Amino acid sequence: MIEADFILENYNSNSIKSGNATWKTPSNIALVKYWGKRDPQLPENASVSFTLDACFTLTTLKYTKRHSKLNSESHNGGYNFEVYFEGKKKEDFKPKIETFFKRVEQYIPFLKDFNFIIESRNSFPHSSGIASSASGMSALALCLMSIEKELNLKMTDEYFNKKASFLARLGSGSACRSIEGELIVWGSHKDIKGSSNLFGIKYPNKVHDNFKNYHDTILLVDEGEKQVSSTVGHKLMHKHPFAAQRFKQANDNVSKLSEILQNGELKQFIAIVESEALSLHAMMMTSNPYFILMKPNTLKIINKIWEFRASTNSNICFTLDAGANVHILFPEIEKEEVNNFITSELIQYCQENHYICDRVGIGAKLVSNN
């Protein structure tokens, strides 16, 4: 599909007076990382992610028909919306949403036909490196697609999901990987049939049983806001001296990971996933300006994992997003042994002993649509 396929034409928004849609949309954790983009929100390399389950955003979009478009274009760009996060009005969220609306309006031109109230909450700390923008922007995109579905009742589920992913990408790149599950590929890649820079797709090949019901326990080393936003981090790749090599490395790792997901080789999975996590942070440490996103306890956890794996031959491994928190990945068959290790050895390195037990999920869920 191409961009023009997602432009809504010949619609009549007068058929809708008011309504609301609520979506529960998960975060995701990249196994092969996306780091570096070009306009408009297109990835410099393909990425592969696990869709999560317990880490989610719940968003309700309430909408009422506007009687006129008298609001000046300078007020929220001509869009009429209010934003509430966890019960409190959030004016500082508005600029990002206005930017999102501007990017997607050509594809969903009914945006200025309605007044919106956006109410959202997370099941995890906001802006701490658990991809809150991914779950948040994908939830908003899905709510908007629920309105479009009302305008086009013949829309297929396949088109709905692809366009939701397409729109979510324009709010936050990784958000396009939070629409479906369990494994999502985003970015055009020669070895992944149907892959696209425009939206995420479900991994198209058969997945080995070793990777079914995979667990992800997130150790909250630092629950505060990240030192540097992902937006800034991506921009630092534009003149990065190692950018070209990194993009090639990531695409090569997508090919390798695709084979691993099919053959079930857990040790090879560990090698790819941990290398990808450290490569992401290496790029930040060698950018200009440079940043160290890991904390001392991040490194302590990583070394503990390596020691445990060496002594037990466990298939536990770690990955990191653009922050200090550690995602511990392990197969279903090892959950008891690894959970005991986490509670006895690792949670002491978490802020106030906080951690989240999660696992691979199946994607976003429509909660209500009225």
Image (spheres, helix red, strand yellow):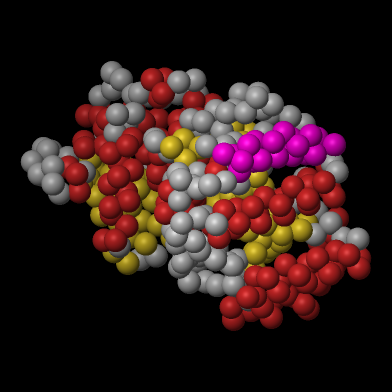
As drawn, which residue projects farthest toward the right?
312
Whether 16 is drawn above or below 29: the answer is above
* Residue drawn at x 72%, y 54% as measured from the top left: 274
Whether 184 is drawn above or below 92: the answer is above
250 in the magenta segment: yes
Q: Quadrant of the C terminus?
A: top left
Horizontal side, residue 363 vs residue 3: left or right? right
* Residue drawn at x 50%, y 48% as measured from the top left: 240
x then y, percent, for residue 57: 48, 55
Horizontal side, residue 64 vs residue 178: left or right? left
Whether 28 is drawn above or below 202: the answer is below
Query: Which segment is the magenta one?
Result: 244-263
The count of marks equals 0
Main secondary-structure element of the magenta-colored stretch = helix
Q: Report which quarter residue 255 is drawn in.
A: top right
Q: Is residue 122 visible?
A: no
* Residue drawn at x 74%, y 39% as measured from the top left: 257
Relative depth, front residue between 158 and 169: 169
Q: Is residue 108 visible?
A: yes
Whether 185 is drawn above or below 50: the answer is above
Horizontal side, residue 345 vs residue 118: left or right? right
Horizontal side, residue 133 vs residue 312: left or right? left
x then y, percent, for residue 96: 32, 51
Q: Report which quarter residue 14 is drawn in.
A: top left
157 in the magenta segment: no
x then y, percent, for residue 231: 42, 51
x then y, percent, for residue 12: 25, 24
Relative depth, front residue between 125 and 195: 195
* Residue drawn at x 40%, y 57% as measured from the top left: 120
